[in-house]
Image (cartoon, rainbow, N blue to C red):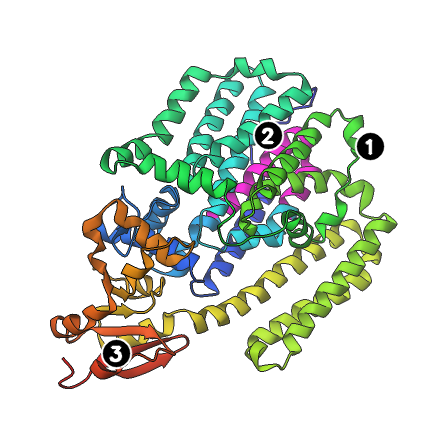
Amino acid sequence: MTTALRDTRTVSQRDLLYMVLYALVLIALAWMRPLALPDEGRYGDVGRWMLRSGDWLTPRIDGLPFFHKPPLLYWLDAIAMGIGGVHPWVARLVPALHAWLMVLVTQRYTLRYLGRAVADRAALMLGASMLVLGGGDYINCDMVVATWISICIMAFAAALQSEGHDRRRLGWLGFVAGALGLLSKGLIGVALPGLVLLVWLIEERRWLSMLRLPWISGMLLFLGVGLPWFILLEHRYGGFFHYFFIEQQFTRYVGTGFNNRQPWPFYLVCLVVLFFPFSTLIRWRPPMAVMARGQLATWRLAWIWLLSILIFFSIPASKLVGYILPVMPALAILAALAWPQVHAQRTTRWLVMVGSLLLGITLVALGAWTWPSLLLPWPVRTLAIGSGLLWLVGGLVSRWLVPGKLLMLWAMQSIMTLVAVNAGVAYQSTAKGSLLLAEYIKQQDPHPQVITYAGYPFDLPFYLDTREVIPTLGAWKQRLSYVRDDGDQQLIDGLAFEPAAGKVLLEESALDVLSRQEPHAWLVTPANLQDERVQRLYQKDKVMGRWAVWRLRAGGA
């Protein structure tokens, strides 16, 4: 495990400039679009509700307890919105900050053990990868937990290769990162770093070195940071431990009845595509420079890190792209190490050229498509065509570029692709979400009362910035008779912990009573709703995208 250590306590002006520029890129992406449904509407509003209600202990959706995830994302979102206001881009600052932190820590760790050139390449590849840029621009727990898993692995790996105060300090960082990983998404925040480090230490035949970590003080830090929220929730809501750790963690991992079923190679394909063109650099054999400089321990750690988590998440039937984010620092380190030896190889050049041409043709085709179902506005189509042309031209000229310019071209291609994708998602989110509807309601009524019927737009409370729960009318008695992995089930699950909060979930027949009790309320329904009760009591006022708003008819109550 012999490795030349480098001083990472000082940060150069160039490093600061690059990190500021990267922060600006992340902020610009965060600003580009409205909330994507359902996740961003749901997770963003949980943090907003904490801020408005003052209840920082219990995550809630429309007043109902929501215990699918721990609270770290919500706490940070609430703090951000308390400072910057309730806006989608402010809520996205939390995953953006974690993407930025992941890149920074990876650069410092790689600088310590692999040198300046490898560290800078790894940071550029990681920060410009489409998966990290996309994860840093999306309000959910995936980027948050991925960052703390990565920091935990790198902190403990560095501690195990250090002496004296450095070992204690880095060990403490590892324990705190593990606790924050637990608070980000539950057991995987601890289990995955433990799995990676255990396999690595066994491979290195150094597993006894774990005994030299600051276990007593470190565990006190871990327990003090990570456990109080869980204990308080179990004390307030009996059965919380079973619901959270068994139903939401273990059962979701081993079960087959959940959404997003994908074949086992799903994540392998995601990494090849969403880390392209850097993914073309990965080789199974260690580069000659790694062996010559005694850097095999770090190279093996990166491979064990990548394979352990890739296999772990490939086992369950349910798969989402963001789950694989924790492997990205390892992938970037492997690509950065291989760059000097393989970027100019014939195989790499052909892979990059073919992949670039395919991506370019796909983006240009999407931008030029004229089918009504895929017809995008001209600004979005122009961005798609421009991004596609950049891939096409880059794929043709890349073999003649010097290494530094080639790497920057690849980074620019990835960033431009994310800009084009963001523009398309912005258009779709505006059409599917309730942003325009909320703006219309607020123009007519600054402090509106709202009722939803036959559907719950998860982003509506966020855009209206409501201080009160929104009654949601539907066939709830029928819905209670079966379990389904959807948004309605997430509302229903909260009833087990606070039955009294279920007053917001009303049967459709309650509309007659509500129309008399709340005659000035705005009724929000799916735009295509055909319902005799609604049409008898209300008159459709406005249709925007997938949602419609109704007002009570004169004499309708």
Q: Which residues are magenta?
A: 97-124
Give coordinates of residue 426: x percent, y percent: 49, 68
**Residue type, mark 3 in image:** Val
Question: CA separation, marks 3 and 1?
Answer: 72 Å
**Residue type, mark 2 in image:** Val
**Residue at left 81%, top 50%?**
348
**Residue at left 66%, top 34%?**
302
* Neighbourhood count class around disc 2 (C-alpha, 10 Å): few under 14, some 14–19, many 20 upward: many
Residue 288: image tag: 1
- Frontmost of labels 3 and 1 is 3
**Residue at left 33%, top 59%?**
479
Q: Which quadrant is the C terminus positioned in? A: bottom left
Q: Which residue is mark 3?
A: 534
Q: Secondary structure at mark 2?
A: helix
Q: Is residue 295 visible?
A: no
Question: CA separation, marks 1 and 2?
Answer: 25 Å
Q: Nearer the viewer, residue 510 or 7?
A: 510
Q: Which residue is mark 2?
A: 196
Give coordinates of residue 295: x percent, y percent: 72, 27
Does residue 141 appear left or right of residue 423 in this picture? left
**Residue type, mark 1 in image:** Met
- Frontmost of labels 2 and 3 is 3
Mark positioned earlier in the residue sequence (1 or 2): 2
Residue farthest along the bottom direction in this orientation:
554
Q: Nearer the viewer, residue 256 or 109?
A: 256
